[in-house]
Structure formats: structure tokens, C-alpha cells
Image: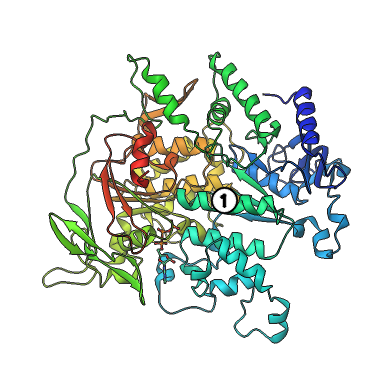
Amino acid sequence: MRRTPALFFAASRCTKLHVSHRLCSEPIVKIANGTFYRQHPSSKAAPGQDANSNPPLFPNLTLALPSFSTPYQHWAILSPSSTIRTAFLQILRGQYICSPPTARTHPYLSEQKDSRLRYPERAIEYVGFDVERKVFGGAYLSARYESLKEATDFTLQRYLTGIITMNPGEEELKEKAIDEKVMSKVMNDLELERFLQKPVAMLSNGQSRRARIGKALLSQPLVLCLDAPFIGLDPIVSKHISKVLHKLAEANAPRVVLSLRPQDAVPDWITHVVYADENGKVDAVGSKEYVFAYLKKRYEQLDNTDTMDARMVELKEVGTHLTECGNFEASKVSNSTSSPSTTVLSCDGYENIDPLKVPTGEPIVEMEGVRISYGSNSVLGDWEQDVNGTKQNGLHFTINRGSRWGIFGANGSGKTTLISLVTSDHPQTYSAPVKLFQRSRLPEPGVPGITIFEVQARMGHASPEVHALFPKYLTIKTALKSAWSETPITKPKMNEQDEKRVDAALRWFEAEINPSPKPNGELEWTSTTLFGEISYSAQRVLLFLRATIRNPDIVILDEAFSGMDDLARVKCLLFLSRGQSMELEYTDAGPKPVAREGEVVVPGLQDHQALLCVSHSRQEIPGCIRDWICLPESGTGPPRFGKWEGPVELDGGRWDEIWDW
Ligand SMILES: Nc1ncnc2c1ncn2[C@@H]1O[C@H](COP(=O)(O)OP(=O)(O)OP(=O)(O)O)[C@@H](O)[C@H]1O
């Protein structure tokens, strides 16, 4: 797909038309026919580095981000690739090499009296949400729950002010003092006041997300670039944050630029969009209406073509998901059901009403009246629950072999806390009424307690916390093999069949993991490429494989798909359910699972396994989930439980049940 000169003309004309009464105010960022590179385009590839590892990004980009405009201009970058989205935001802040160098300027910044704001990287703040716990010092789940605080466990208040030394001197306090009015406005807007005295390591994902936006706002930049700000936020908080951002953007305090994934609903207040493909080529840029009309047209043209590749499918999805209430899955189902002869399958191979029931076995996790609180703050189980017709205190929750659970609830409702009781990372697993594999952590008369090693050997766990702490210096192969070891850095205990599984999975996912994939099936790259060298999305894919490849008794996927590129996520979901027995075929109706001939070294989920999945995004819910629990916000009653007869992807009503809409 090419960007045409006509398209560019239309886009720039539209940009100009929208800057009406303040025509004289200079743009904050102006790019005129610029092409960008990670390294200097004339620099030679380092030994061992692929010569194509420095491709041109956003070739011949023309764009102006106004300092003021009437009507408003609020920009977003949309791309299926997280790397491209991030690169775009960084380019706005003066990062990456621009060719020719004069093609990118920041005219409005040179007018600034405050010298700090004359530098693009200071005037234009970037907040990315990759591996965010690391920013907060990084703590494994167990450490998050220890009551003794470490020196790095500074409070949210200190994090926000940047005063993180043990005994700050007067000078530091003065230098970092924040205007009270600014502080209280930001705290108010982001609803952060009640967490100010909490150590940052203890904040939930959603809370820490808001904290990071808050910190960026306190430095009072001219522009705030938010990279995938809605990942991991529950739908209600997402809406709230979106409203807050809209208000800030309207006041130009600061201007806000968002990066969005194709499956994200584009907030209604976004007026201008850059759509770039996964190689960094801009397909369309300009007003939202213009870009969407363009994508829609492409979408309709695609409807008449037979050949589809992954990129076309991606574009098609974007073209059908244009507004905040866009729901392309629903339209896909209603379109497809018009032909009764073909059975519609979710992208991971499930029928809308799934005729196959996985037999459930004995309980492997039993919670009978769990209540977790910190001091006077109860975070889980502060309710009366109906258990077989009688009211009982605390959380009563049983997970059987073969069951597939979705664990939902608003940000801060206790999902990760619940998971930490299952993984035994929470110190209160010892005292709380929790049984794992029918044994308590502490010995009981005649029954030895279950050890942490035994528990963790029987589970596979992928989550943002695991990701944040995963050693970046391991090779891809060692990282995956660590599924068979007690910690990522200890020697795995594997047999020949296990080794075969590792190779099969890495071959299967080479396109998603290897930064320079070669379709020759060789695996040398897996021993020469490091975990830290692959993209964020690729790291997520690898950690997903690490959690599932052994077919352990319990698979825990806590926000495991968030941050994965779209097509990688779809492929992982299919692999989770079907292993190598099915593959994706790209058709004009989207990616479609089809049976595959050939040896299956890695199968999908087995009957002896239980699956626990936590996510806020409908696209990330595996099609096999049949039971769900929705945890309440503190003080609002017991959790709600429900069942689905088929994949949530094929019926939007199932998703609405959870959020009680
Ligand atoms: N060690 C701790 N001390 C005090 N409060 C804690 C501690 N750990 C977690 N919390 C609080 O417990 C509540 C539940 O947190 P949890 O991370 O389980 O929520 P969550 O549902 O997973 O949220 P999210 O969707 O945002 O990830 C939050 O309010 C969090 O701040």
C-alpha cells in the first residue's frame, strides 16, 4: 500500500485549513518531507548485525503539530506495530536521525522564555507503559507483599516529587518543590490523592499507570506523548482517563499525543491521525475523517480481492473500528452468519456455542473464606458471599482441573492479589484458608505442607511483574528453556522431548520473535539473540510461551497479551488452545484458524490443565474461557460469577455481562 502524492496534499491542506485564526503561531513540531533512521543511514552494519536493521522510518513524512489551533487538533498515531508507534512519538521529541536534518524543526520551542522548554526532549514528555514496574524499582510479587519496606520503597508522594533519597537536604527539597495548586489539580484529575502515602511498589497496574501520567504532568511539559495509555486499564478507568486527557488537551496544558493500537477505540476527541503500517510507512495522515475515509475505502477495495496478507487484515480491522463504540467483531459475526453453511470460528478456533465441553476434574485451588487486608484497608474478601445457599464471609472460589477461568474486575479490585495467592507469592497464603493441589502451605496432621517449589513447578505464569524482572541478558533459547527450571537463571531439568518442544515453538514463532527472521527453519538465532534485544511485543510472546509450553497443571496469564502486536496476539491465542494442530490463514474476513497437517510437538491446552486469565481487553480473552469471576470494588458487595457458552470474541454481549452494562 502506498501513500500517494494526492494523499499527502490532501493531508497537509487539511492540516492547514484547520489552523485558522492563529495562523501565525508556530508549530511545536514541523516535519517537511523527512525520513528517519535509528542509526545514521550511511553507517555500516556492525559485525553480526543484519544490513537491513536500519530501515527508513516514516519515509517522506510531512506533518505539523500546531502550538494552538481553532478548531482543536488532537493527534494520535495508529499502527499495528508497537515499535513503530513508539518510534513516532520519539521522533516528535527530536529522537532518531532525520534526513535531511533540516526537515524536522521545533519552531515554537525556540520562542520559549523558560530555557528548559527550548529542548524538544524536555518540552515534549514521553510516557511509555512498557514494563512499568521497573520504573518503580521493580519488585517481584512476593516482595510487593512483604511488610518490611526496602529503601527503594518510596511513597507515591515522593515518586511524584522526585525526592527519593533517604534524607533529602533542604536544597533538594527546595529545588524539587512543586507548586501546590498544580499538584492538587493533577492529583484530583487522576484521582491519586488516596494513594499518596502508599509505597509505589504496592500500587496496582492501573494505579501506577495514573501515577506515571501524573508525574509527567507535574513537570508541566508543552506536549505529553502517551504510548498506549489504555493498555491494562479497565473500561471505566479508560473512559475516565480519556476524559481527563481530553480536558488537558483542550486547555493546551499540555497538548496530548496518543499512540493507539489498531484494536483500541479511537477516543472521540482525537481529531487527527497518522496511520503507519508495521514497517513504518505512513499510509495516511490528516484529519480523522480523512484518514478513516481513506482506510474505509481501502477496506472496501480489499473486500473484492482474493489475496490477503497479514497487513491487509490489519488495515481491514482498523477500517471497521473507527469510533469509541466501534465493534468490528459483532459485524464480523453478523456478516458471517448470513452464510449458514460455514461455521464461524473465533480466531482461536471456537464456535459461538461451543459443543465441546472440557471435563472438569478435582479441585486444584480452593479458597474458603479468604480475606486480605493491609491494616484497616481490605483489598479482597471483605464481603458476604452466597455459598450453596448460605451466606459466608470472605472469598470462596474453587478452580478445578480442566476449568478455564477469566478473572475480571476494575483496576485495584484485587485480581493480582488473588493470583498471588494461587502462585503462593503472597505471604498470607500461609495463613489464609487456601489449598493448592488439596494441600495447605503449612503442614496439617498427617499431611505435609506443599512447598513453594512444588507449587511453582506445577504452574506457568506470565504477567507484567514476571516481565519486569526477567533477566534481559538471557538468550532467547535459555529464556524459553527456563520454563523447566526453578528460576530463570538456574539450570533447567529437561528431556529430549522437552528440547524438541522448545525448538518447535521457536520455529513456529520465529516471525514474531526474531528481529531479522529468515524462513530457513534454522535456530542459530535463538542462541545468539538476547531477550533484551528483541521488541517488547516479542518479549511478551516469549514469556507467554514460557508459561504454556510445558502444559503445566495451572496456566496463569495475567495481562500476558497486553503490549503484544495484534497479529502476534492472535497467533498466541490460537497456539494456546490448539498448539501446532491449527494455523492461521489470512482471508478477507480476517485471520481464520485452519487445521494443519504434520507432526504436533506442542499441543494446546490439555484436559488436566486449568487456565486463569486476567485482562481488561476483550481482544485478549482466550476463546476457551467458560467461567468468569468479576471482583467488586472495595465495599461494593460480593464478586459476581458467570458462565459463557462460547468465545467472548463472537458475542459482545458476553463482555457486557461482566461489566454489567
Ligand atoms: N503490599 C501492599 N500494601 C498495601 N496495599 C497493597 C499492597 N499490595 C497491593 N495493594 C493494594 O491492593 C489493591 C488491589 O491490588 P491488585 O494489584 O490486586 O489490583 P488489580 O485488580 O490487579 O489491579 P489492576 O487491574 O490495576 O492491575 C490495590 O488498591 C493496591 O494498591
Disc 1 crowd, CA 10 A, few/some/many (<14, 14-19, 20+): some
Which quadrant of the figure shows ligand 1?
Answer: bottom left
Quadrant of res 606: top left
586 sits left or right of 353 in the view: right
Tell me if I can see residue 602 in this picture: no
Q: Residue at x 77, y 44 (%)?
A: 69
- Where is the C terminus found, in terms of image quarters? top left
198 sits left or right of 252 in the view: left
Q: Work out whether residue 183 or residue 31 is closer to the camera in this orientation and state it.
A: 183
Task: Tell me where residue 243 appears, x and y as whole percent.
Answer: 57, 50
Badge count: 1
Q: Is residue 651 above or below residue 235?
A: above
Quadrant of res 514: top right
- Where is the N terminus found, in terms of image quarters? top right
> Does the beta carbon at disc 1 come under 8 Å from ligand 1?
no
Task: Tell me where residue 386 appears, x and y as whole percent.
Answer: 18, 57
Q: Work out whether residue 556 or residue 581 is closer to the camera in this orientation and state it.
A: 556
Residue assigned mark 1: 243
Tell me if I can see residue 440 in this picture: yes
Q: Is residue 297 above or below residue 538?
A: above
Q: Residue at x 33, y 64 (%)?
A: 635
Q: Work out whether residue 574 or residue 85 is closer to the camera in this orientation and state it.
A: 85
